[in-house]
Amino acid sequence: MISYGKKYYFKGGGILDDVWDIPTIASTSSERIGYPTQKPEELISRFIRAFCPEGGVVSDFFCGGGTTPAVAQRLGRRWIACDQSRVAIAVTADRLARGALTLEGGMSQIPDFTIEYWGVYETRRLTQMPEAQFRKFVLTCFGAREETQTAGIHGYKGSVPVWVCHPDPKQEVTHKEVVAFANAIRRTLAYQQANLRDGIMLGWAFTPEAQQTADQLRERQNVDVNFVRLDLIRIDSPRFREHVASLSTEHADYLNFLTFVQAPRVQVGYKRLSPLTYQFDISDTVITNAGAKIINVQWDFNYDGKRFVSTEGYALGKATTNITYKFPSTGVYRVACRVQDDKGGEGLWVGEIRVK
Ligand SMILES: C[S@@+](CC[C@H](N)C(=O)[O-])C[C@H]1O[C@@H](n2cnc3c(N)ncnc32)[C@H](O)[C@@H]1O
């Protein structure tokens, strides 16, 4: 490319001005989603086509209303999108799901993406993780390193072998698992050469037989298996607050400044106004974050129980407590309402409605 004054002359002969004249999105355009700083798709499309090959990865770490991932998806690029605002993430997810490709036969295909919330550990997801991923997570939290080469030992804390239970909290550690771990410890060089006899088992619960077995091993067989119980503690519980505060020895008043974002308790009331038409009301919703106010309400009137996709016209809603919706036909519908507050709290209500 040769630059000359304001114009760029490409070797192939084309001319490109150094000003891109792209109009803002008209207020009536269907492209407008209502995100305050939304950029025109044409602008983002030019950047992506110029700088990222097909199949390449486009990242936007301040994705706002999701223009970048939406355009990247359409242009056949992979993408990573981030934002500090939950509203931005909700709007982006909606936009991607609604921009689904329509396949032959009228079926639509929603792009395969996942949403990760940084710094938030959802206990349900934790207990449903694949075993290997769960173990790695627990070992990291415990300050241990993962071990993948030695059968029966999952990690080491310093030089002490560590074993991690199954992700399902209903599964207790059994005496057989204790024996197997003790045998794995005995096979280690550290045990055989330096008589390092300790081991740690991390588990949700231990059967009485498991406890007995550990006691016997300690007394008779020179293996010292210690149990550490995993527990799911709510982040806003007094127990957790006290624990975090106890870690701060420098600031005695730490507890006063410790706040956690909490989910609003979404309450939805509804009534039938006329055939197929219902009014929904969220005025009984309780906002649990001090001083917070609702900034976004979205509705999915045909929720599949997995992926929330706002019904057209019901995405990025202001704090409207009352809305009216006309269902397409009679039948049973699963309805979901997502409420977000300006402190980052987010809650979901799901209900089944027999529409008449
Ligand atoms: C100008 S908007 C992006 C608009 C976007 N291009 C679109 O088309 O909708 C900037 C975004 O950056 C986000 N943001 C600001 N500071 C951030 C930070 N430190 N980390 C992550 N996101 C941040 C804001 O929440 C906002 O959504």
Image (cartoon, helix red, strand yellow):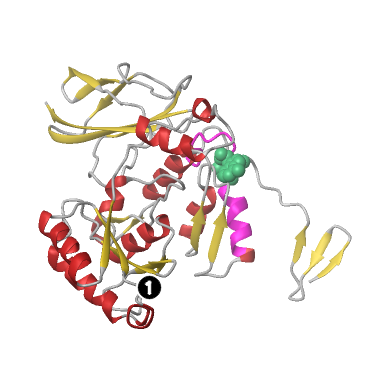
Left/right of residue 134 with respect to residue 14 in the rendered view: left
User: In this rendering, does residue 314 appear at all?
Assistant: no
Magenta region: 30-49
Label 1 Cα neighbours within 10 Å, binned few <14 / some 14-19 / many ≥20: some
Residue at image mark 1: 147
Mark 1 belongs to which amino acid? Glu
Q: Secondary structure at mark 1?
A: loop
Ligand 1's image quarter is top right
Left/right of residue 242 with respect to residue 230 in the rendered view: right
Q: Residue furthest front?
A: 219
Between 92 and 164, the residue placed more toward the observer is 164
Residue 224 quadrant: bottom left
Left/right of residue 94 with respect to residue 352 in the rendered view: right
Q: Is mark 1 within 8 Å of ligand 1?
A: no
Q: Is residue 152 above or below residue 255?
A: below
Quadrant where the N terminus lies? bottom right
User: In this rendering, does residue 345 appear at all?
Assistant: yes
Q: Is residue 100 above or below residue 183?
A: above
Quadrant where the C terminus lies? top left
Residue at image position (51%, 42%) is 65
Residue at image position (71%, 48%) is 21
Q: Is residue 177 magenta?
A: no
Between 14 and 20, the residue placed more toward the observer is 20
Between 108 and 198, the residue placed more toward the observer is 198
Q: Position of residue 319 (x, y in %)?
A: 42, 22
Residue 312 quadrant: top left
Q: Residue furthest right?
A: 5
Residue at image position (65%, 43%) is 23
Q: Position of residue 26 (x, y in %)?
A: 57, 36
Between 63 and 203, the residue placed more toward the observer is 203
